[in-house]
Image (cartoon, grey):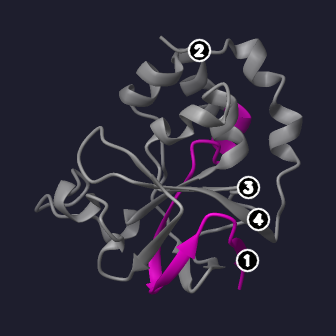
Amino acid sequence: MARQLSTEELEQGLDHILASPKDSGALELIVRRPEVDVRESLAEGRLDTDEGLVGDNWRARGSGHMPDGSADPEMQLNIMNARVASLVADGPDRRELAGDQLYLDMDLSPDNLPPGTQLEIGGAVIEVTEPPHTGCRKFAARFGKDAVVFVNSGPGKKLNFRGINAKVVRSGDIRVGDVARKR
């Protein structure tokens, strides 16, 4: 079993996270989830206005937030700060287990990226949406209770450490290393 960091260890990484770039940041990881609990790290992918990350199970999985159980268009993409993901995963090799599709080295706080903000990544454009993104029991099982508390309370909640939701507003290809820029 992988090591789960304590609250004290997580808090030691706070300054590094708070130094995340504000206006642009590298796309460090693309993760497709073709099935529940299956992760595929990609060097490149396609973001599509109808499908989200092509090959991901977002549409098929649906959402308990929707009255009919269909996929929530406001939660098409899950994005996490790459620095937070590396910290809670105790290194870059387990980041994909957080369950997000895109990992950006960028400040995801609502002051920096309020809902409605658009980001250009490669040939695609995405838009930050309103629904909050919170840690689930799978996140807790993989990274520990202290990690869930770290991302979902105090500064973590205020700064969206667990991540944000977004939707694709212009389809296009993306690659690891592309720079996400505010529009």
> Of callouts 3 and 2, which one flags the residue occurring earlier in the amino acid sequence?
2
Residue contact at pointers 3 and 4, CB within 8 angstroms: yes
Q: Label 4 is placed on what type of residue?
A: Gly
Residue 143 vertical placement versus 52 (above, below)? above
Where does the image place residue 32, in percent across and percent down from the top left? 39, 56
Q: Residue under circle 1?
A: 181
Mark 1 lies on a secondary structure that is strand
Whether residue 145 appears in magenta in the rendering, the answer is no
Residue marked by disc 3: 105
Instruction: Identify which residue is drawn at 49% across, 52% down.
Output: 132
- At a point 84% along the width and 45% down the height, the residue shown is 18
Estimate how packed mark 1 is, as few (under 14), some (14 to 19) or many (20 or more) residues with alpha carbons within 10 Å: some
Amino acid found under the numbered disc labelled 1 = Arg
Q: Measuring from the top left, give residue 154's x and y in whole percent.
A: 69, 32
Residue under label 2: 4
Q: What separation in Å lies between label 3 and label 2 (alpha carbons)?
A: 22 Å
Residue annotated with mark 4: 25
Disc number for residue 164: none
